[in-house]
Image (cartoon, rainbow, N blue to C red):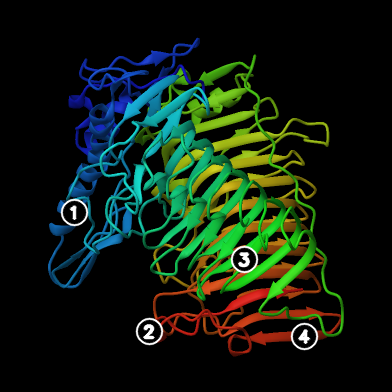
Amino acid sequence: MKHGHVFRATIGALLLTAAAVADEVSSGSGNGSRVADRDSAGAEMTEMLNICSAPYFADPTGKHDSTEAILRALDDVTRITQLAFRQGLAEVEALPTDGKHYLTGSVENHRADGITHVSCCARFPFVPVLFFPEGTYLVSDTLCYRLKDLFNTYNNELNQQIRIRGAGAGRTVIRLKDGSAGFGSGSRKPVISFMAAEKSNVSMSNYCEDLTIHTGSGNPGAVALDFFANNSGAVRNVRIVSGDGSGFAGLRLGHGNYSGILVKHVEVEGFDHGLHADSGTFGMFAHVEDIRLRGQRVSGITVGAISLSLRKIETKDVPVGLTCTSPQGFTVLVDSMLNGKGPAGIDHKAGGLYVSNVTLAGFDDAGKIDERVSPAAFGEKEAKGMARLPVEETPVYQTSGKSAVGVRRFGAIGNGVNDDRPAIQAAMDSGAAEIHFEPGRYLLNQPVVIPATVESINFNFCDLVSGVDLKKSDREGFLIAGSGGSDALPLFIERLMAWEQWNGEHCTFTHASKRSVCFKDMHTQTLAFYRNTVPGAKVFFDNVVTTSGSFPGATGHGRCTVSLKGQKVWARQLNPERGEPMILNDGGDLVLMGYKSEGEGTVVRTIHGGRTEVLGGVINFGGKENPAFVAEDAQMRISTATHAWLEDYYFRTAIRHTQDGKTTVIMAEELPPRGFPKSRGPQYLIPLYK
């Protein structure tokens, strides 16, 4: 997305009900209070809210305190979610009191014998990105929404779709005033916080990107960024600096039940801890990659009771690179360089640990760690086992000089009622390299074909609706076509937030070419996400969520969320849930770095000579019948942990591996326990199976 495409609004437009927001955005009419920028083709671009425009007028010169302006904007965007939730809640409360009744289009929201159960918005509203243009924004208090009644009926915080974006690290700077009140020693007070309460499991699609956070001087208790998300969310392209080296942490992941977080391309200078990841509820996971940490006073990275996977970590001038503190924690560290000065580059106090291809320099124990496993590796008695797979970096799309069009130009309406497929197909066939979706809810009744001329599709966090014919078919929402050989340009697809009306028997994407595809920041709630009909392509998943099955606990539907045949795949934070199996690797190579499963189905089934490597993540809940990981005449290398909230929810069989007529089975009781309370079942670690 070009940063010049900015959403401008008055508070009156922002505080519409969820239905009014969707209707107004999709029709493009408005009430006269909004001025939308337009691209060269005349398409409305209303994806972002400019923090410097009316009614906020934050000061980008750094001369005046912008705290109140930013807080007002955060309150407004979260109020959109609040009003959408209240609308759905009222609809559920109007259902009959006798029996169990689901709200149409929102299967997790229902009324059972007069009791209302509402977990999330029945229809996700469009929430604009908070955009900070280039400049310095002076603040003196924590930047976090202030709404006090932002809870669902399960007492989970509804802090979702909070998206903060700058013009680039070093170009947009949010700076804490020197010696700000409340940021004294021991306070652990954040400058930016995505969580006002303590726990949630519905905080989807939160982002902090493309900016610098500077905690000033004289703020020894500061936490630059306290991030939180569930299932989908990312901190990306962020620089974090302490003016005098003090502060508790540059980036903190804490609170209860965060999951599905990707941290990528982040730099932290100073603080006691560069990255501090912990959780009072032992859950769930994050994946961290391409992080540079310098000058920490206690530890570059500190890991507590959480499953954390780390890749391409670089430390400098630290007393210890990585510290593992909790018996319930599990840490994976690969392909990294820890440089510092102290007794040990890795201080492993407690918990599970897997280390591979890590160099320690400057420490008393300096040297190369080819592989270290704690407590123990499994599956090595008769053979060396599967070697690690190579990891390829996710390609980056270059937008310069590309032709771009919006789907509205071709007649798309985006009201969730009219069939927008013909207009979207016309946009795809226009010859433009970049296709973007304006905010709205787009109904498709037939598949959209993505031709080889399209290089980038930006959904801009729009929603999708399955038409009656598409829903009943075994087809796909989007068909990736084109000859695609090794010389073809990759296809980049990003920023989709398709909620529960995007459902049925079909699949979101069918990949019918050898063209490389990069999926980024994609969330589909009740539909299989990916399959391919032509083998031989490279596929990248960066922060992708997909859920199959109509509602939690649904079984017997037979749908696989991600089905891969003969592909080379690298997944960084892939959250597949309720599939049967959740991921199928048929004859390809899959590297899965950070994931969360959920449901009875096998997490990854690998067949026909395929190779699967799992680094970190969690098996969340599990079945009595199916093994967690299955390989049949194939190979797998697994380093992960389990997680659950209830005593009976765990995979009894962790591994079932059949090779050359011999079957290896590893049961839960054979593996080291995580030390969870008994009420949460016998959760365990797979430190390494190969």
Q: Amino acid at mark 2?
A: Ser
Left or right of 334? Residue 677 is left
Please indicate, yes or no, whether residue 602 appears anywhere in the rendered image: no
SS at mark 4 in the image: strand
Q: Which mark is residue 347?
A: 3
Residue 667 occupies quadrant: bottom right
Q: Which mark is residue 679?
A: 2
Work out how far the residue at label 4 is from the one at label 1, CA to CA, in angstroms. 51 Å
Left or right of 449? Residue 498 is left
Q: Are circles 1 and 3 on residues that touch, CB within 8 Å?
A: no
User: First in sequence: mark 2 or mark 4?
Assistant: 4
Q: Amino acid at mark 1?
A: Leu
Q: In this view of the protein, which residue sits in the foreground, 230 or 407?
A: 230
Q: Counting other residues with Cα less than 10 Å from the Cα at mark 2, is it few (<14), some (14-19), or many (20 or more)?
A: few
SS at mark 3 in the image: strand
Q: Are circles 2 and 1 on residues that touch, CB within 8 Å?
A: no
Q: In this view of the protein, which residue sits in the foreground, 65 or 92?
A: 65
Q: Which residue is mark 4?
A: 663
Work out how far the residue at label 4 is from the one at label 3, CA to CA, in angstroms. 37 Å
Q: Amino acid at mark 4?
A: Thr
Q: Which mark is residue 89?
A: 1
Work out how far the residue at label 1 is from the one at label 3, CA to CA, in angstroms. 49 Å
User: First in sequence: mark 2 or mark 3?
Assistant: 3
Q: Are circles 4 and 3 on residues that touch, CB within 8 Å?
A: no
Please indicate, yes or no, whether residue 228 appears anywhere in the rendered image: yes
Residue 197 occupies quadrant: bottom left
Residue extending farthest to the bottom is 669
Q: Judge depth for marks 4 and 3 and give the one in front.
A: 3
- Residue at figure coordinates x 40%, y 67% from the top left: 552
Q: Counting other residues with Cα less than 10 Å from the Cα at mark 1, is it few (<14), some (14-19), or many (20 or more)?
A: many
